[in-house]
Image (cartoon, helix red, strand yellow):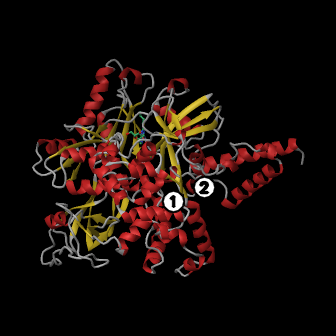
Amino acid sequence: MDLQNARRRVDTLRGTIEGHNYRYYVLDEPSISDAEYDALMRELMEFEEQFPELLSMDSPTQRVGAAPAKGFQSVAHEMPMLSLDNAFNHTELVEFVERVRRLIPDEELFWVVEPKLDGLSVELVYERGILVQGSTRGDGRVGEDITSNLRTIRSVPLRLRSLKPVPERLIVRGEVIIGAEAFETLNRLRLEKGEAPFANPRNAAAGSLRQLDPQVTASRPLDIFLYDVSYPETLPAATQAELLPLLQKWGLKTNPLFRVCFSVAEIQEFYEQLVQNRETLGYEADGVVIKLSSFELRPRAGEKSRSPRWAIAYKFPPSEAVTTVRNIELNVGRTGVVTPVAVLEPVRVGGVTVSNASLHNEEELKRKDVRAGDRVVVRRAGDVIPEVVMVLQPEHGVERGEPYLPPESCPVCGTTLVRLGDEVYRRCPNPGCPARRKEAILHFAGRDALDIDGLGRKLVEQLVDKGLVHDPADLFSLTQEQLESLDLVGPKKARNLLESISASAFTSLARLLFGLGIPHVGHYLADVLQREARTLERLMAMSRDELEQIVGIGPEVAQSIAQFFASLENRDLIRRLESRGVHWEEPSEDQIPQGPGPLTDTRFVFTGTMKSMTRDEAARLVKALGAEVSSSVSKKTNYVVVGEKAGSKLTKAEALGVTTLSEEAFQTQLIMWQGE
Ligand code: IVH
């Protein structure tokens, strides 16, 4: 075939394939079999191989083209990506609607109400219909360029359908999510491979988009819904209600579920319907978003610095469910902290299945008096770890199990547990405890640390139990034979593991610092330390005072870092890592965008007396992760941390529906945030 005919056939094939993609991924109405589809793709690939001059980036064959990246570039958003104010109850909904009515008194207002998707917001830029850039929200002004990853999402069109003329330039925003069913499958597969399951679909989506290797992103079941554009006045749609179908005509996936409302009563009705049907949506939503539909009227309502006045998020109440405690187990963490965990009959709460709930610490457990066999209320609020709220009265005549007895010795290595100072936790003080070693090695191999592909929990457990690995440095002297001696590891898997171990040896200082598991140093602070110290030698030589000069590092964290590097054992570990070929690059200037912290845009209020730290200390810890701390509760507050003798702030938080955290829940949560 000559080039001209080939070009014609290639164009037809691309058009046909894109049409099928659109029907399958956007409309959810496939019209051919998988085999027929594969045949079309194969034919297109063959043509592109034979006529490389016909290849183009927007071809459906080019979704997973890019090689793994070293880091993400920063991109400034042409228009800031705003966030939304929250309403937590009917009164606040009424206040919002009234406020907009006062600002625009002479017009009849109508609203578009959409589910508020609990995923990651992203921006896509199309130029003359071709996808040229995709980015994360970041801090709203500057995000990260994740174009290669977004291209792998099948419901993101690489070029727009041109049935309607497409704009010169289109900036469109939406939410990347993982659907409920896809999430369950993903986690099941991870468990089978010995990998840690994701806590919830949002984390899974976030982790997948942050992959440096688009191949990995492509293997995750990501989906997208688009819901907003910059410069709507330039488009042939006058309202949000017209915009959504227009986006869909261009091939962009929109959520079919939305409602046009003319009154508060209609909004409230739709909201309540969704609260009732939350479980059946097929994806996680944490509220509804109410938007003034008319683009012409929006500027009259105006904007604040971070959020528009013409829209609001009306949040769902935190969700609770009743289930039975199967057992209370003890978990020994990387730092030796022993925490009781309630193992539950699996139950759906707020869209995810929960089978474990934190009991935080033994005092908390004693207070709630949870026992095996009890019926309990469990609660999940947003991203927060599920917790047991209370024990229900046993049915008449039913005997309860034995009260929980705190352990005197480590459930894993038998060492007598200790308490440091006035800590509420007991710790296993034995650094050689197999449970601690396993957690430390898993952490070191984890995604944000050295990212050793394929080294999951089951393998690490065997390696430690067989005495083949004692600490992270031992991973780098493992042999093919040793690996083959493990259960479920054949020659091929052993080879792959050795390869991924040696590939991981070439890393960055930030990943190494995070991987070492210095208490309080999550991957955000590890980035900060990398940026400030630039080399490990310099960091190790820094005094506590010098460390405290770094923005984001408070006295506790400074002490923790200094102490870590003062330990001979830790110094030895670093020396052995180096001598076995682990190598970390000095960061180059442009490689380290200062990203947002895990708590950026999150507002805390502390109230009452805390047992384990002062309120100032607690405030410094969350500020180090990007949070804001204020002294009074408003509906903009995300968390109120409640100590003993809390007064009016607690009452106000409850009235406003703001999430409250007990001191125990806060500590548990903090460890998670620090680890992000
Ligand atoms: S509209 C200026 N619509 O909620 C308004 N946002 O809290 C732009 N979100 O950053 C947002 N579902 O990530 C809009 N249907 C929806 C949404 C939605 C989820 C997220 C979005 C935004 C955040 C604000």
Q: Position of residue 547 (x, y in %)?
A: 34, 45
Q: Nearer the viewer, residue 123 or 597?
A: 597
Residue neighbourhood size for the residue with mark 2, other residues' Cα within 10 Å, grouped as few (<14), some (14–19), many (≥20) = some
Name the one closer to the observer, 195 or 410: 410
- Whichever of labels 2 and 1 marks the residue nearer the N terminus, that label is 2
Residue 437, by quadrant, is bottom left
Place of residue 250 in the rendered image (x, y in percent of width and height, measured from the top left) = 60, 37
Residue at image position (30%, 34%) is: 264
* Amino acid type shown at disc 2: Gln
The residue lying at 31 percent from left, 25 percent from top is: 100
- Classify mark 1: helix, strand or loop: loop
Find ligand 1 in the image and state its quadrant. Answer: top left
Looking at the image, is 66 positioned above or below residue 632? Answer: below
Image position of 310 (left or right of 659): right
Q: Residue furthest top?
A: 106
Q: Is residue 479 above or below residue 1?
A: below
Residue that appears at 44% across and 65% down: 573
Look at the numbered disc 2 and give the secondary structure of its residue: helix
Q: Which residue is mark 2?
A: 215
Residue 86 at x, y = what percent?
31, 38
Q: Give the residue at the far right of this rendering.
A: 2
Give the residue number, with chain letter if any, for mark 1: 451
Question: Which residue is pictured at 28% across the width and 79% down the height?
Answer: 414
Asked if residue 33 lies left or right of residue 643, the reply is right
